[in-house]
Structures are given as C-alpha cells and as structure tokens.
Amino acid sequence: MQTFKSNLLNPISPTETQLLKKVFITLKDGKISSISNLHHGDYEDRTDLICIPGLIDTHVHLSQFYIRGSHSPSLLHWLKTYTFQEELKSKDVIYAEKVARDFFADSVSRGTTTSVIYTAPYKQACDIAFEVAQELGVRAIIGMTMMDANSPDYLQQDSTRAFEDSANLFDKWNRKTGLLEYVFTPRFALTCSALLMKITGDFARNENAYIQTHLSENKVEIKRALELFPQYGSYTEIYDRMGLLGPKTILGHVIHVDDEEISILKETESKIAHCPDSNFFLKSGMFPLQKLKEAGLDIALGSDVAGGTSLSMLNVMKMAAFRQNEYVIPPQEAFYYATLGGAKVLGKENIVGFIEAGKAADLVFLKIPPTRRDEAENILSRMIYTHEDVEIVETLVAGRKVF
Ligand code: GUN
Ligand code: FE
C-alpha cells in the first residue's frame, strides 16, 4: 500500500476537467484503492506536483523510433526513402531489441502508460517488443506489421506466413499477462492483398481481437488504393468488404473521408486514432475533427512516430489543437482524447484513463510551471502549450514505477 498527497486532474468529458487539490490517493495491488480528503498514516507529499491519468498513444510505430524528424514532402516518398529501409534493420534481433528498449524508455519518460504499437514486419522483432514491454511493465497492445503486396522484397511477406506468424504471436502474447495484448496489423490497402486482409479480418473477429491499419491519410494513397481495388467505391469500403472494420478496429489518420465512408465507420463502430503531428509533418491534410465528432465517432490520439516527430502525447495534444484551422479545441478536449477518450477507443474505460478508486494505478506525476490562476483550464493549458517546460517526475503503470 502506498499513499500520495497530490493534485489530480481528471478528464470528465471533452468539455470538463476536474481538479482535486491536495487529496490523498492510495494505491493497493496495482489499483487505486481510494481518493480522499483525509488520511491516517504515512503518505508521500507531492502537493507541488500534478497527477494525471497515464497518457494513451493509440497509434505508433516502434521500429521507426530512430528516424523521427526525417523530412519528406509526402507519405509515400517518406515510406520509400526512409521508413521501409529502417524497418528492415529490425530483422536483426540485436537491433530490434535496442530499438524496443529505447522506444519504451522514451515513451514512459514522457508519461505514456498505454501504447498501441506497430512493429517491423518480422515475427522476431514483434516478439522482442513484447518481451521488452513485459520486462518494463508497460501496458501495450502490439502487432507485427503485415505486408504481402507491392512492397520492397526485403519487407514483403508470404500471405499465409504473415497471417500465421501473427496468429502465433497472438496465441503467445494476447492477454497472457495483465498488461499486454495483440493487435492484428495489416499495414494498409496498398501493401496488403485481399486474401491477407480477409483471413485476418475473419480470424480477428472470431477471436474478438484488435485490428489496426491506416485509412485515408494521403490523397495519392487513396487514388492508388482505388486503382488496386477498382470494384469498391471508397477506401473505407475496401476495408469494410475485407471484414476489417468493427468496434475493435483502430484506424490511423482518417483524413479524407466522405459522408458515406463516415456512415460505414459509424455503423461498424470503428475507432479513430487521430495523428495530428504526423498529418502536419507529412502534409497529409487536416483531420476533419468536427465532422467526425459530430458523426458520433470515437476519437483518440496517436503520436504516429515516426510520421510524428515525438512520442510526447503532450506534444500531440498541442498539435491536435494547432492542426485545426478554425475549429477550436479547448485544452480539456485535447486532454480527454489522450486519456479517457483513448481508453474508450480501446474499450478500456473501466480500467484506465481516469483516476478513481477501482481503476488501475496508471498515473503520471508532473511538475507544471506556475499559472496565474490555479484552475483546471489554466493548468491544463500550460501543461499542453508549454509542454517543453513540464517535467515528468514519475510514471506508474499498475502501481509500478516505470519511470
Ligand atoms: N501508411 C502505411 N504505412 C505507414 C507508416 O508507417 N506510417 C504512416 N504515417 N502511414 C503509413
Ligand atoms: Fe502510422
């Protein structure tokens, strides 16, 4: 048992953040056992810090960690010039372990406690990512990127093998520990055959497993997808017909979608990982946040490293606000997407994303520079917009210190 006295920020909704000043948080067996104004017994005084729920990154490429900030005018050029060659390096198990260690060390140092991860298209690289995640004690949903078409030879997999490797990794790691799960990861329609997408969709649906892929990130990508699958009317329809959409599917980007596609996403209850830093960096376009929100879709945030430049979800929250030309995202809303909203996208809102008794003790303690007024909005705003000045003091996952 462990008790802290601190100040809590909790995401009630996209419009409301609760600030609880100088309360006692008691942790027991990896969970929050109580939050109260009174406490008898020992406690650690952290009243100079702010405590927030562990941050959730719903879209990130572990094996791209070292190529952050590689300038390119557009997605497909960036993939060909830097990304595919970098992923090849993870074929070497020593490299794969090093990048996994550096990735997770950086991630927890920035207050991320849950990540949804793509690894390089090699079974061993994915297995190693799981081992490192387990050793560190982070919460993660990890998948081996699958690509069996139109890819460089060194990355392209055999269709059946890509699926079987994924199914083996799923058997080995999915829910075998309290913190780790598997996500089936067909890269995107440009590099996946119909066969691979269909068998993956069927299997994942039967097993109630997560699926992740990229949808409508870049206009040239969309054009190519429709050339490859001319029988379908839209990019979203391709995934729908392949059986890849559903409540456990997390779609990265989703920028250039029309009304019909939005209704398919809504009907299938598919989830969206909005990656504003990446969208900005690769000039992919502006995420139609207002439209997708009004359509009632569940939205969370992703760093999309290395299309995104940093694993910091504070930076991603800032970019979410910056990357809307007119729509105003208040700090409460950005904070919600990176915490409770992220948890909801993953179906984990009963476990993480909010600080209250019964939830997992996934917590971040931060030192935020003083604000003029001591209210939730001022503190949040300072935390997001001047995140370079915020010190992450400690990160806990299930009550265990990971940073
Ligand atoms: N689309 C297909 N693969 C990728 C990737 O690795 N990163 C991004 N941002 N988009 C992709
Ligand atoms: Fe991505």
Image (tube, rainbow, N blue to C red):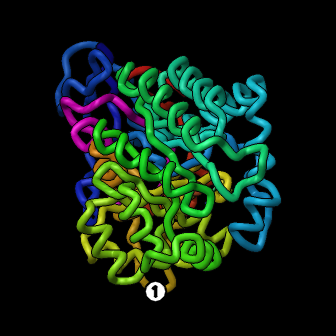
Q: Main secondary structure of the magenta part?
A: loop
Q: Residue furthest bottom?
A: 326
Q: Find out whether residue 2 is within the magenta segment.
A: no
Residue shown at 72% from the left, 72% from the top: 74
Q: Find out whether residue 367 is within the magenta segment.
A: yes
Where's residue 288, x and y in %? 43, 78
- Is 213 located above or below residue 122 in the figure? below
Mark 1 sits on what residue? 326
Residue shown at 64% from the left, 26% from the top: 124
**Res 32 seen here:** yes
Image quarter hosting the C terminus:
top right
Region of the chain picked out in magenta, as a range: 348-377
Splitting the image into four quadrants, where does ligand 2 fall? bottom right
The amino acid beneath tag 1 is: Glu
Residue shown at 34% from the left, 83% from the top: 259
**Which of the pair 346/51 is nearer the observer?**
346
Image quarter hosting the N terminus:
top left
Residue shown at 44% from the left, 67% from the top: 238
Quarter residue 158 falls in? top right
Where's residue 258, x and y in %? 40, 83
- Is 207 located above or below residue 13 in the figure? above
Left or right: where 24 falls relative to 53: left
